[in-house]
Image (tube, helix red, strand yellow):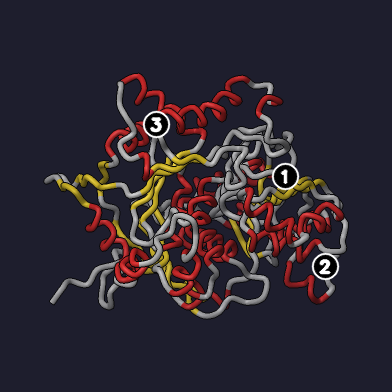
Amino acid sequence: MALAKTLFEKIWDRHTILQQSDGSTLLHIARHLVHDGSHAGFKTLRERGLKLRRPDCTFGSPDHYVPTTTRDMATIKEEGRRNVVTSMNANAKEFGMTMFALDDIRQGIIHVVGPEQGISQPGLVIVCGDSHTATHGALGALAFGIGASEVTHVMATQTLWQTKPKSMRITVTGQLGAGVTAKDVILAIIAKIGAAGGTGHVIEYAGSAITGLSMEGRMTLCNMSIEAGARAGMVAPDEKTYAYIKGRPYAPSGQAWDEAMVYWKSLPTDAGAKFDQEIELNGSEIIPMMTWGTSPEEAGPINGVVPDPADIKDLEKREALQQSLDYMGLKPGMPFTDIRVDKVFIGSCTNSRIEDIRAAAAVVKGKKAKIWAMVVPGSGLIKAQAEAEGLDKIFLDAGFEWRYAGCSMCVGMNGDLLNEGERSASTSNRNFVGRQGRGARTHLVSPAMAAAAAIYGHFVDVRSLNQGHAQ
């Protein structure tokens, strides 16, 4: 009788080329995704006289350094930043990889482009020089970020040495309530297990609340597995996955589709397979969440209050909490809904897909923003779709800025920054000190929660909007 295996084990074993006695494993890499930050890898190849091993399996799009107010890089004054983006075109031409350039409507955040183009598929090992590569695990792939030297290694060999991580299954039971999104689920998970709770593990998400999510929601969930300390996040492929992939430009078709389906349907975790750790949450108990501190684990339900360091017995943890509150400019006992916001950012590889933009637009429609806010679609195709649906007009009429695709204010290396001391409601994935600019204060929320903060000027419980209670 065959040994029961997890989804992760099946993919790992299929891509193993060689395993050393110390546990080091040489993996075949099925897809390598690159962005403007990967330029050093091409430079190294050139210096060593090496070719790109599999240009047909390498796909790129500029996203980190690109401006979101224009597609004309000539208007960017910083020469270094401008060259990083424009060099991608030259690298793509020289090394023969597929490139979605700034003048291509398919350009966007690479972790949005991969699934959108059908490049990301179940059962593949996918890497990129960016920690949020975990996003692609939503399609049943093993996807993880790699360092600069590893990027060069994959470019030259299409392989990578790795040590096999442990496995964790997080089961979210029940049904999510009104106003509760995948962003709230992952923030609730991180608040429960901590920012280091998944360290050394690949997380598989399971349970009725997870299978009930859309593909976009699953991408949000897997995207922030990194904020839980995990190496990767995954959701087993199912009928939603297959329907999402079918017909996309790089998806298999004809007989190749039929053959792929046979493999894909063999991937879900076998009954009786063992995980190194199991965690369970009741999805029906999760309510809209927001972060209040400087770590994704410092999060709570929107109807909560800022915690009091005096309630913490551990001295080190108490001091850390106080430092976090000092940076964020918050006082213990303050209701989250009393926290006023200066700016709103809706975008990033976490929440910039059409579902996210629709959710935000539904909150904004017919209202006016009290504070500065912008919406940054995850790709040119999403931007075009939103405009075809009239969503851009909803935002523009409300006083929001409607931008071009890019990482934007998530990463703060492209000109989109908060001023020192400003507070944001952000749909991105990190709220670390200085993440959105020097001295910036970041609160992570869902698109609907961010949109509501823009309309009211402070955080509100989106569940109250349908009842007319928000002020």
For numbered disc 1, what is the local secondary structure?
loop
Q: Residue at x 64, y 39 (%)?
A: 436
Side (left or right) of 52 relative to 328: left
Marks 3/1: CA–CA distance: 31 Å
* Residue 443 horizontal/vertical position (percent): 66, 51
Of the image marks 2 and 1, the number of the one nearer the N terminus: 1
For numbered disc 2, what is the local secondary structure?
loop
| Of labels 2 and 1, the one closer to you | 1
Mark 1: give few (<14), some (14-19) or many (20+) Cα within 10 Å: some
Mark 3: give few (<14), some (14-19) or many (20+) Cα within 10 Å: some
Q: Residue at x 43, y 27 (%)?
A: 40
The amino acid type, in three-letter code, at marker 2 is Ala
Marks 2/1: CA–CA distance: 28 Å
> Can residue 439 be seen?
no
The amino acid type, in three-letter code, at marker 3 is Phe
* Residue 101 horizontal/vertical position (percent): 56, 38
Q: Residue at x 76, y 46 (%)?
A: 343
What residue is pinned by disc 2? 470
Which quarter of the rendering shows the N terminus?
bottom left
Of the image marks 3 and 1, the number of the one nearer the N terminus: 3
Of the image marks 2 and 3, the number of the one nearer the N terminus: 3
Which sits in the foreground, 76 or 467? 76
Among the 4 quarters of the image, the one containing residue 290: bottom right
What residue is pinned by disc 1? 403
Among the 4 quarters of the image, the one containing residue 409: top right
What residue is pinned by disc 3? 95
The amino acid type, in three-letter code, at marker 1 is Arg
| Of labels 3 and 1, the one closer to you | 3
